[in-house]
Amino acid sequence: MRSVMNTVKTTVAALAVGTLPAAIVASAPAFAAEPDWNQVAQALGKSGAVQAGGVYRVGFPRTDLKVTLDGVALTPGFALGGWVAFLPMDTQAMVMGDLVLTQDEVNPVMRKLQEGGIETTALHNHLLRAEPLTLYMHIQGHGDPTKLAAAIHSGLAAGKTPFAPTPGTATPANIDMIGIDRIMGYFGQDSGGIYQFGVPRAQPVTEQGMALPPAMGAANAINFQPTGFNTAAITGDFVLAAQEVNPVIKALQANGIEVTALHSHMLAEQPRLFFMHFWANDDALKLAKGLRAALDQIDVKKDAASGR
């Protein structure tokens, strides 16, 4: 029975974060010509993986940085996980990304990206009181995917983002994952000790008429990093319509969760969206209740297992 539940849990979690099995990915709408992802990886300087919706996503976690917040050492997969994602568009591609940078890297990286035709769509903090301060640069581009990848490589090379393969880890999260799932109404996924949720909005988010899969940064993202036997730090971002912003703020504050940033990530998305980042370090189940209260204020897809 446990093995069956684990299989169901893994499948639903994959649906939430956009890492579906190949058979399901293959059912995504066909494009005129899929890019050669090997060439893209070579130009980018790092390889990734094809995810649901045909998105090719590459992670750039800042494994070189040692960042702390309120005495908690932040792991790269928790709050320092930069990424870029390519979505095929006919014979070309759209690329979006979220780059984690130090203060002195921002302008050299931005300048090099602009020279390569990669636009900056947002630049801001995600957290408060983090030491050293990290900033997050959201980017976007359209065109030949290999040329886009080469431009991103040049931009990142102007800073210190590592290009080496990300070390794998099998350390399981030591918090009550089943209890968190029950409260959240969704199945999370353990990723190297970070318990993660990806909850898509009910209605599609589009950019230039293209529906953005969750792997393009269009889903509510919630991360738990264990900090004790029953405690965890939480961060992530909610993807909100304008009328949802203040109800979510009230829900988070009523449950002891700090709102740390509110801003846009894109320039021409439909509908217009706002991204709200948050932080707390407390009893994990208590925080799950607060996050569930916030999700109740958002038009999100119901979980296939719970119906919530």
Image: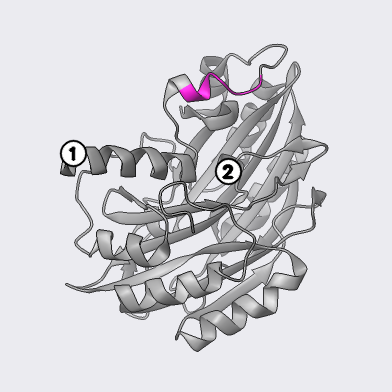
On the image, the x and y values in percent for residue 74 come to 35, 65
Residue 294 rendering spot, x and y as whole percentages = 54, 72
Quadrant, the N terminus: top left
Q: Which residues are magenta?
A: 24-29
Q: Viewer-nearest of labels 2 and 1?
A: 1
Q: Please check the rendered image and state whether residue 25 is part of the magenta-colored stretch, yes or no.
A: yes
Tell me which amino acid carries mark 2: Pro
Residue 39, given in percent of the width and then of the height, sits at 56, 16
- Picture quarter containing residue 126? bottom right
Which residue is drawn at the image coordinates 20% and 44% (left, top)? Answer: 170
Query: Mark number for residue 281?
Result: none
The answer to whether 167 appears left or right of 49 in the picture is: left
Task: Name the disc covering residue 3, or none.
Answer: 1
The residue nearer to you, when weighing 156 against 72, is 72
The residue located at (51%, 88%) in the rendering is 254
Q: How is the image coloured?
A: one colour
**In x, y percent, where is residue 71?**
31, 79
Q: Label 2 belongs to which residue?
A: 214
Task: Answer with left or right where residue 130 lies relative to residue 138.
Answer: left
Count of numbered tags: 2
Using residue 46 as the reference point, say whether residue 140 is left or right of it: right
Q: Which quadrant of the figure has residue 242?
A: bottom right
Q: Quadrant of residue 169?
A: top left
Residue 190: in magenta span: no
